[in-house]
Amino acid sequence: MKSVVKEKSMVLLAVLMLTGCPGPGDRLPDRESALVGVKENAVCIVYPVQPGDLIDHLEFHDQSGKAFYAEPGDGDFHPAAGHCLRTYGQDLRPAQAYALHYGVSNPQVPYRFVSAVFTTSYDDKGVLHIANGWEE
């Protein structure tokens, strides 16, 4: 009888460890897609800005595995609707795939990531193009 109780306890413990505790727990932040395009021959990333949004960090990855992480610091970045988000001086080379994730905090909205995945290219005239992007 003792071994049956012990086995059931072990199974219950294993299930709890694999599934976590019930309830809201530590949820992953929501993700929101950004739009990527070209403005004045430079990459421009925009998203639907909400009043009070604050960009507190940027994660930047390219297809070669290069990673970059930036925090705006004292002058945290308050994005403006319709304006391009900063890329913090990252050089975007042609024929490369990129993934950018901006951490966005806001007192009225749960923490979220604004993400963009895109590929750059240049034509014979040196004009930048974004695969599946918009151009101005």
Image (tube, helix red, strand yellow):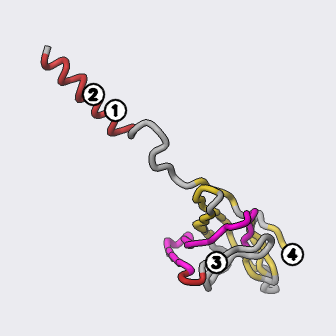
Which badge, 4 or 1, comes first in the chain's sequence?
1
The boundaries of the magenta stretch are 45-72
Secondary structure beneath dot 1 equals helix
Q: Position of residue 38 (x, y in %)?
A: 79, 76
Which residue was labeled with disc 1?
15
Q: Can residue 101 be seen at all in this image of the molecule?
A: no
Relative height, residue 128 to residue 116 (above, below): below
Nearer mark to the viewer, of 3 and 1: 3
Which badge, 3 or 1, comes first in the chain's sequence?
1
Which residue was labeled with disc 2?
11
The residue under the point 34% across, 35% down is: 16
Horizontal relation, residue 53 to residue 66: left or right: right
Secondary structure beneath dot 2 equals helix
Q: Residues within 10 Å of mark 3 (few under 14, many from 20)?
A: some
Q: Nearer the viewer, residue 134 or 82?
A: 82
- Quarter the N terminus occupies: top left
Which badge, 3 or 4, comes first in the chain's sequence?
3
Residues marked 1 and 2 touching at CB (< 8 Å)? yes
Where is residue 17, by image quadrant?
A: top left
Which residue was labeled with disc 4?
136
Secondary structure beneath dot 3 equals loop
Nearer mark to the viewer, of 3 and 4: 3
The residue under the point 82% across, 86% down is: 125
Q: CA distance from mark 3 to mark 4?
A: 24 Å
Is residue 62 in the magenta section? yes
Q: Amino acid at mark 2?
A: Val
Which residue was labeled with disc 3?
77
